[in-house]
Image: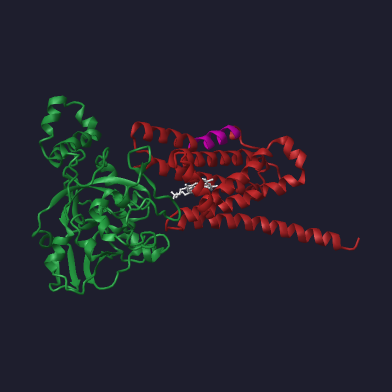
Amino acid sequence: MRAIKQPRGFSVLLIVALCIPPALAITGLASDILGGTRYFGSNPIKEGEHFLGRWTLRLLVVTLAVTPLRQLTGWNWLAKHRRTIGLFAFGYLTLHWIAYAFLDVQLDWTDLKKDLLKRPYIYLGMTALVLMIPLVVTSTKAMIRRLGRNWARLHRLLYVIAILGVIHYAMAVKKDLTDPLTYALMLSLLFGWRLSRWSRKATTAARTVGSPV
Amino acid sequence: MLIRPAADIRSSELTPEAAYWNRRDWLAAAGGAFAASALVPGSLRALAQGGSPVAQGTPYGLQPGDKPTPWEDVTGYNNFYEFGTGKEDPAELAKGFNPKPWTVKVDGLVKKAADYQLEDFIKPSKLEDRIYRHRCVEAWSMVIPWRGIPLADVLKRAEPTSQAKFVEFTTLFDPRRMPGQALRVLDWPYVEGLRLDEAMHPLTLLATGVYGRDLPNQNGAPLRLHVPWKYGFKSIKSIVHIRLVDKQPRNSWQLSSPNEYGFYSNVNPEVDHPRWSQASERRIGEFARRKTLMFNGYADQVASMYSGMDLRKNY
Ligand code: HEM
């Protein structure tokens, strides 16, 4: 496929765009809590926490969509931005966790402990958070080189993380499952795309091996 | 039973705090005017200024530091799934709802079953302004100045028979007027129930208004319950049917998730919801969490109704 060059300024634009949701969350929450405004409505801590949770999930889906999009369009320059988007997803998740632990539960250790041990949606979310740490640690160029093929294997964990995120979401909402199911559908499509490519590759490989020389 | 409107908090103490969120409107009017204005009914003042109404009424069971939750929050942050599942949906989606005329049916195990026009239903009683604490099962809370009548008044008028043990309430079912009912998030219509002694308790209020005004649609116009010692979902909105029965009625949230929501649903800091702690709550408008009080602070008045009951089992 013909290589298509990255539009000028894309890298900067991407980073600026990725800074917008957390900037809105932080300024909105600060203003609501300290200044009594209602950017996040009447219950800003809850709403801010939810806002960050939803953005984490969106960004995880976007990260997972980079490779299929690159393969579909031939925009190979997209590949290097996958890391940026993934790192921002981790940043959003960290803020989501901070909103939970510092603002919502207000570092009440008994509550934090009880949540973590007894409440499935919390320990699934925490599992997702912990699983992201090795991905962040291995996101440097040196690590990519060092891990070789294992790097790609390791980073397939992102699917597990996103699936945990969706289950967590479905358990956190009270009744209306429309949004969690929408995310589940998007993930299935992305996953289906990968599976079909893998199986195609596998059959091609098998045919190559099995064919008489 | 004697219900004392918490003597330690006089409503004169409440008013300046209640007026606090009108600060902007008030900046112009200095000290003396402020004192004078306390004498004018809050709703009149608000109308004159086109601003938010000021809380008025007798405080019931308020705790130190409790002050009325601003009108904007009381009418802008609602769980009313008949008008959408988001907290801000009802204020938006209920705008076009017309609660007039409204008929309430009272029947079942009563001597005087009847269909009433809302006005005739309310008229025999004296409307009271009462400031109550409100605790949602989702661990947030408010302080709300309701206007209404004791439920006991209308029940007595219907003359329950000796077999009547419970009261069942039903919300309007009309998906064309209540767009949220198009989505099967709950099994419509919404139903709720109380034991007869709970229903007859002098604190149990049938509200027709809030902040001295008729109930806004998103708050359950034109007629809703408020049971201050129970989680908010017991306080059913837009009631069309009150039926006296001999068996414990089913209630919508219990039907939908029996392991999370029970029939009694008394506020109880010791019994957690499966997904969150009920030991503390966030008062809307405040940052630090508050401790949740047994029976939401109304234990003196209501605990005796549950003596001998295992409140862990009967959540
Ligand atoms: C990949 C990881 C995660 C994702 C994608 C995620 C996403 C979400 C989403 C989408 C929501 C619901 C927002 C809404 O209702 O609109 C949510 C709620 C929530 N999340 Fe997470 N989350 C993750 C991890 C965590 C972690 C690690 C914690 C804390 C230990 C956490 C705590 C919460 C809490 C407390 C809620 C609110 C539940 C409620 O209000 O009842 N999440 N999350």
Residue located 38% across and 60% down the image: B261
What shade has chain A been given?
red
> Can you say whether A174 is above or below A2 in the image?
below
Residue located 76% across and 46% down the image: A149
In the picture, the quarter occupied by the N terminus of chain B is: bottom left
In the image, farthest residue toward the left: B124
Q: Nearer the viewer, residue A206 or B261?
A: B261
Task: Give coordinates of residue B107: x percent, y percent.
Answer: 18, 72
Question: Toward which corner of the image does residue A12 lie, by quadrant?
Answer: top right
Among the chains pictured, the one given green colouring is B
In the image, farthest residue toward the right: A213
Task: Give coordinates of residue B143: x percent, y percent.
Answer: 26, 45
Question: Toward which corner of the image does residue B171 lie, by quadrant?
Answer: bottom left
* Residue A16 counted in the magenta span: yes
* Residue B279 counted in the magenta span: no
Q: Main secondary structure of the magenta part?
A: helix
> Can you say whether B253 is above or below A110 in the image?
below
Using the rendered image of the protein, determine whether residue B95 is visible from the camera's viewpoint.
no
Question: Toward which corner of the image does residue A81 lie, by quadrant?
Answer: top right
Task: Give coordinates of residue B61: x percent, y percent.
Answer: 23, 46
In the picture, the quarter occupied by the C terminus of chain B is: bottom left
**In the image, B199: left or right of A64?**
left
Q: Nearer the viewer, residue B136 or A61?
A: B136
What is the span of residues highlighted in magenta in the rendered image? A11-20
> Can you say whether A75 is above or below B107 in the image?
above
Task: Give coordinates of residue A196: x percent, y percent.
Answer: 68, 59
Residue located 59% across and 35% down the image: A10
